[in-house]
């Protein structure tokens, strides 16, 4: 693994945005905050804890899935993928670089929801560590999906639409902002295709909002490995 | 040394971008000239291990570009033609990121970046986001990447397109300082003449000619170019012919334009043998 490249790309594509474009941070957190407000109003505050925990997941997943558009644009328009292809960078370095950049860029949003969790007395060190572990796994899984999908897009027109649709489908339909227990089992199994689902079940369990299901760790880790293999094997890196 | 044998690239839509191209490049700087769509970029992308050929083979310093792609990437640096910088990051970070991607030791990166940015007169704006730079300045950031790379073979696909004359001269001066082998594609004949020890002309995916400028222009020896209403070659609404200098004098004042022959005329005749 080319760790120096991964970090320099993350600085480039994550830290620079935080430093030079504060509005992009606001744009990144605005949807989970709006959903939090809706959940608060509709449930009269009863389900707000779900939305706070879900907010962290939504920010991580949606940031990474936005990389669908970004990686496609980097390949088609900016030719950054060609530039890196002729170096020692491997496709998994590229995925890792996006994952770290995404995590860096999502960090203000994660911090915001962590502060909220402290405010509503949900925070404990164990829960925080669980959140960090889930965040890392979720970022790698969603970044792999993003780079894989992005590598298959042929034209830049419509890239952001594809990115937006997949981001909504994979982030908001799974039980991110509502209790996973309300879903019928077959639906829940179908939604397992998105790594957001096991991530949400783990965190809802850890925060005392649902039954603890340790098997979900295996599902999430399995999805990380699966999606890394998918992007490594089927992602377009060197063009044919 | 770059060796290309019968390299062919046929895209999925049926376009043949390279048609059994064979080349042997062993000069320090080689310029590949060709019209838009001639196959220059496809050739550079295949040699840079970015694109797989349909058939044929190529090697760089004895390493096969398909089976030894990983080792080829250790010795090459390639700057794509249409590359754009990521606006929010500055010039320094762009070059440093590229050197990290190439696996250059951390201790060497600062000095290499500084040297390349100074050579291209970008050092004073190294902290400015590339979004705030002019198009020419952005282009120079990528040339700086290649120059800082310490690669044995550097591919520069139209590095000076869009640059003003002074910036182009800065790029030329920086290219001349680099010690590795350089393959540069360009539309500019004067750039090829200024930089390259050898010129390759590509047209419709095939090699049209290869050699030094005098070698390539030998077939026009003693001739001038005549542009006017009549001639053997039609370019747009203009007719062109090549005639002996002595005969051209008779055409003076008759509405013809008489010019010295240049490299672009090789594209006009497209491999025809001129009558003596």
Image (tube, coloured by chain):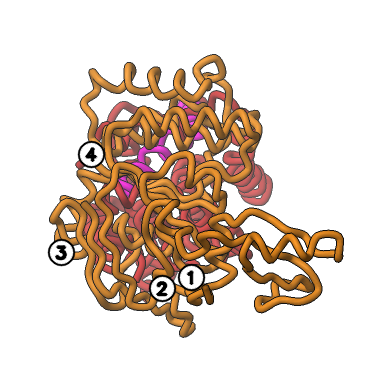
Chain colours: A red, B orange
Mark 2, residue position: B206
- Residue B57: quarter of image: bottom left
Asked if the residues shown at circle 1 and circle 2 are in contact, with their CB atoms under 8 angstroms apart, the answer is yes
* Mark 1 to mark 2 CA distance (whole Å): 5 Å
* Mark sitting on residue A176: none
- Point out which mark residue B203 bears: 1
Relative horizontal placement of residue A77, taking residue B50 as reference (left or right): right
Could you tell me which residue is drawn at 29 percent across and 53 percent down? A91
Residue where numbered disc 3 is placed = B67
Between marks 3 and 2 in the image, the one whose residue lies nearer the viewer: 2
Given residues B165 and A111, the one toward you in this image is B165
SS type, badge 3:
loop
**Which percent across, then down, holds residue A117?**
47, 31
Q: Crowding near pointer 4: few (<14 within 10 Å), some, many (20+)?
A: some
Where residue B131 sits: x, y (%)? Answer: 62, 33
The residue pinned by badge 4 equals A2
Q: Nearer the viewer, mark 4 or mark 1?
A: 1
Q: Earlier in the sequence, mark 3 or mark 2?
A: 3
Q: Which of disc 3 and disc 1 is earlier in sequence? A: 3
SS of the residue under disc 4? loop
Depth check: give the residue in front, A190 or B136: B136
The chain under label 3 reads B
Q: Label 1, secondary structure: give it.
A: strand
Q: Do the residues at pointers 4 and 1 share their chain?
A: no
In this rendering, do the residues under marks 3 and 4 share a single chain? no
The residue range painted magenta reads: A93-118
Q: What residue is at 30 percent from the left and 58 percent from the top?
A: B47
Q: CA distance from mark 3 to mark 2?
A: 24 Å
The chain containing the residue under callout 2 comes to: B
């Amino acid at each position: 693994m080319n760790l120096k490249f991964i970090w320099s790309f993350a600085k480039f594509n994550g830290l620079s945005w935080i430093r030079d474009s504060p509005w992009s941070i606001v744009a990144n957190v605005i949807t989970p905050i709006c959903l939090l407000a809706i959940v608060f109003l509709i449930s009269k505050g009863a389900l707000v804890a779900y939305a706070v925990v879900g907010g962290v997941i939504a920010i991580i997943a949606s940031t990474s899935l936005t990389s669908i558009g970004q990686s496609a644009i980097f390949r088609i328009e900016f030719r950054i993928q060609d530039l890196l292809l002729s170096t020692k960078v491997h496709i998994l370095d590229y995925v890792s670089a996006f994952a770290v950049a995404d995590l860096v860029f999502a960090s203000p949003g994660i911090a915001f929801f962590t502060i909220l969790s402290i405010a509503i007395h949900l925070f404990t060190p164990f829960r925080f560590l669980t959140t960090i572990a889930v965040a890392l796994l979720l970022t790698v899984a969603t970044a792999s999906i993003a780079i894989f999908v992005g590598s298959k897009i042929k034209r830049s027109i419509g890239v952001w639409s594809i990115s937006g649709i997949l981001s909504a489908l994979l982030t908001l339909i799974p039980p991110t902002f509502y209790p996973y227990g309300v879903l019928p089992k077959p639906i829940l199994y179908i939604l397992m295709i998105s790594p957001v689902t096991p991530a949400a079940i783990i965190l809802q369990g850890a925060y005392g909002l649902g039954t603890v299901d340790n098997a979900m760790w295996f599902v999430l880790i399995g999805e990380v490995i699966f999606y890394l293999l998918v992007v490594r094997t089927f992602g377009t890196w060197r063009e044919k | 040394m770059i060796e290309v044998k019968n390299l062919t690239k046929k895209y999925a839509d049926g376009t043949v971008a390279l048609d059994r191209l064979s080349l042997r490049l062993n000069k320090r700087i080689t310029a590949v000239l060709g019209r838009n769509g001639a196959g220059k970029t496809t050739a550079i992308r295949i040699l840079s291990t970015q694109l797989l050929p349909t058939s044929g083979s190529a090697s760089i310093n004895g390493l096969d570009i398909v089976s030894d792609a990983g080792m080829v990437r250790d010795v090459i640096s390639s700057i794509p033609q249409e590359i754009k910088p990521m606006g929010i990051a500055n010039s320094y970070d762009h070059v440093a990121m590229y050197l990290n991607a190439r696996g250059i030791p951390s201790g060497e990166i600062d000095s290499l970046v500084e040297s390349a940015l100074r050579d291209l007169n970008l050092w004073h704006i190294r902290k400015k986001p590339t979004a705030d730079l002019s198009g020419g300045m952005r282009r120079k950031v990528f040339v700086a990447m290649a120059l800082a790379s310490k690669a044995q073979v550097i591919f520069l696909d139209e590095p000076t397109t869009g640059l003003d004359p002074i910036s182009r001269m800065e790029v030329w001066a920086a290219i001349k300082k680099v010690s590795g082998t350089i393959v540069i594609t360009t539309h500019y004949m004067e750039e090829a003449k200024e930089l390259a020890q050898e010129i390759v002309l590509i047209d419709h995916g095939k090699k049209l000619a290869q050699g030094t400028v005098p070698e390539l222009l030998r077939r026009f020896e003693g001739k001038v170019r005549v542009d006017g209403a009549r001639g053997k070659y039609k370019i747009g609404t203009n007719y062109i012919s090549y005639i002996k200098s002595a005969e051209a004098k008779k055409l003076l004042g008759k509405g013809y334009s008489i010019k010295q022959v240049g490299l672009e005329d090789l594209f006009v005749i497209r491999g025809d043998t001129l009558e003596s």
